[in-house]
Image (cartoon, rainbow, N blue to C red):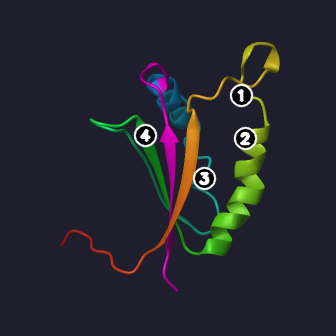
Amino acid sequence: MPSVVKINVLTVPAEQREVLEQRFASRAGAVEGSDGFEWFELLRPLEGTDQYLVYTRWRSEEDFRNWMEGSMKAAHQGTSGGEGGERPKPAASGSTLWSFEVVQQASPK
């Protein structure tokens, strides 16, 4: 069964880039222990766009959905240390999820 790739496209204003990157750095390890998780990358745009890409790869669509309904949903519903326990303002102003199936891959020899 081929792996599935999920790419979350986040629109991030220039003044929120550092905030977004810090939030991802502070969540390090949050997805890595999930069943079926294979890979994560946060991709910063170099030029011509304000969109970050959050790349995750999963053993199956079912594994991704289980993570979405489990630990990811719980993490996004909790508080993240804002003043008075309030949730911080989102760093991204928009989000789109792309889904792909891995049909070919290569690694260094």
Question: Residue 8 at x, y = what percent?
Answer: 52, 51
Tell me how far mark 3 sits from mark 1, CA to CA.
Answer: 16 Å
Amino acid marked by disc 2: His
Q: Which residue is mark 4?
A: 51
Q: Which mark is residue 31?
A: 3
Residue 90 location, quadrant: top right
Tell me how far mark 4 sits from mark 1, CA to CA.
Answer: 23 Å
Residue neighbourhood size for the residue with mark 3, other residues' Cα within 10 Å, grouped as few (<14), some (14–19), many (≥20): some
Q: Foreground mark, 4 or 1?
A: 4
Reading the chain from its start, which is encountered first: label 2 or label 3? Answer: 3
Reading the chain from its start, which is encountered first: label 3 or label 4? Answer: 3
Tell me how far mark 2 sits from mark 4, CA to CA.
Answer: 20 Å
Residue 35 visible here = no
Q: Nearer the viewer, residue 47 or 44?
A: 47
Residue 38 lies within the magenta run:
no
Q: Which residue is mark 1?
A: 80
Q: Is residue 59 above or below residue 64?
A: below
Q: Is residue 101 above or below residue 89?
A: below
Residue 78 location, quadrant: top right
Quarter holding the C terminus?
Answer: bottom left
Q: Which mark is residue 76?
A: 2
| Range shown magenta | 1-16
Q: Is residue 9 left or right of residue 31?
A: left
Mark 4 touching mark 1, by CB under 8 A?
no
